[in-house]
Amino acid sequence: MFNFRLFLASQVAAQAGTWLQFVAVAWLAGQSTGSGAALGGVAVATFGPLLVLGPWTGALADRFDKHVLLVGTQLLMAAQAMSLAVVVLAGFDGLTLIYPLTLAYGVILALEAPVRRAYVAEIVEHQDIPRAVSLTNVVAAVGRVIGPLCAGVLIGSAGIGWCFIVNALSYLIALAVLLATRRAELRRTAAQRRPGAALAGLRYAWRVSELRIPLALTAVVATFGFNHQVIVPLLAANTFHGGPGAFTLLYTAISLGAVLGALSVARRRDIDLRFLTTAVGAFAVANGLIAISPNLVTAVISGFAAGASALLFITAAGALLQQRCAPEMHGRVMALFTMMLFGGVPIGAPLVGAIADAAGPRVAVGVGTAAALCACAAALRHLNSPSTAPTTAATL
């Protein structure tokens, strides 16, 4: 478990810095334009490469040393964050350069995210995967708390450019910790060098129902319901008429709830499709409460519940996918999961941003609620069908 503890330590730094940068870029775009479409554009640049490159980056994760790839991506992310800092602190036209630099980050993320998720299976025993995935998501959720809080403090004091400097330092800290890994203790799988590896991963995930259904649920809910980077700034400024304090408070409430949601999976060893469906339904209810909240206080409480149910679902889905897929498919399956989780943002974020501009942020939140309810209903119908027999990796 030494390597897993090192990995968690590296993720504390990296995830806090990542969310600090997400918040800083969203606030910069929102303040510069006041437009939901602009925030959607930033989301497209950040997560679009995941949607396009996911199958191939997953194949790379199964082909090459995951530890080496993870170290390399931390270094590249540090360089990208420092470039953002230079642009902002030098006073250049922010959005003109923010978009290409954010796109560069998106390309790096398209490789880093599936590698990071698949790497967990190489540093713990198979039976410990649910707990390891849960703890990893807890750390990511804690980063979602620390990052926005630091962003709020830095934006209001030192200036937004320092957010990117601190983020660059966080990646360098993560890099230093990862370099201490005991490589001899890694549970590496055989490299997959056969041609057509990306397509093989897609076919495999489709024919195994315990992989296909979690991926489909993630795609629908994440595309339309997990657009907080677009919705939260607009809710804080336009609906509740607040500044950086309201923005930070609402974002932090969602993040604190995410910590609780991820922790709730840590002790579970029995994760199945019905549990995932229940989590989606809970998210739909909590997200709907945000849409109808009469004031910031009730929105913060509802946001806490939405964050908890969202991470409950994400953590359980990730653990189920890791356990049910064949070891040689970990990189490709987790790349598909990452695609579904973040790759839908380029589709959902501009749509939700445009709806927020036209009809208001509350209606935009309602779209995510409706999508989650539809996904929940479809999954329940499948699970309750008498002719449904789950196909697992073991039966292939």
Image (cartoon, rainbow, N blue to C red):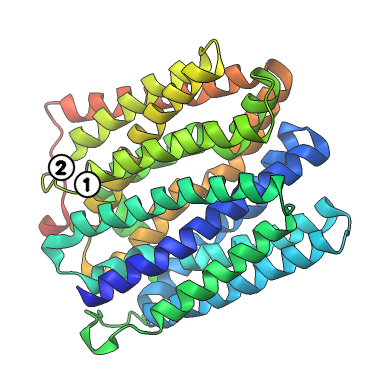
Check whether the beta carbons of the residues at disc 2 and disc 1 lie within 8 A of each other.
yes
Q: Say which residue label 2 marks.
A: 390
Residue 180 visible, this orientation = yes
Using a 10 Å C-alpha cutoff, classify the residue at mark 2 as few (fewer than 14 neighbours), some (14 to 19) or many (20 or more).
some
Q: Which mark is residue 210?
A: 1
Q: Quadrant of residue 59?
A: bottom left
Quarter of the image with the C terminus is bottom left
Q: In this picture, is 109 found above or below 313?
A: below
Cα distance, mark 2 to mark 1? 6 Å
Residue at 23% across, 59% down = 132
SS of the residue under disc 1: helix
Residue at 36% across, 59% down = 334
Q: Quadrant of residue 227?
A: top right
Quarter of the image with the N terminus is bottom left
- Identify the residue at the far front of this view: 157
Q: In this picture, is 348 found above or below 176?
A: above
Residue at 11% across, 61% down = 127
Residue at 20% across, 49% down = 266
How far across and down, in percent of the image, does residue 224 sit? 51, 32
- The kind of residue on which mark 2 rests is Pro
Q: Quadrant of residue 6?
A: bottom left
How far across and down, in percent of the image, does residue 236 sit? 63, 27
How far across and down, in percent of the image, does residue 343 sit? 52, 49
SS of the residue under disc 2: loop
In the picture, measured across the screen, residue 233 lies left or right of residue 123, that is: right
In the picture, measured across the screen, residue 102 lies left or right of residue 226, that is: right
Which mark sits nearer the N-terminus, 2 or 1? 1
Residue 42 visible, this orientation = no
In the picture, measured across the screen, residue 344 lies left or right of residue 9, that is: right
Q: Which mark is residue 175?
A: none
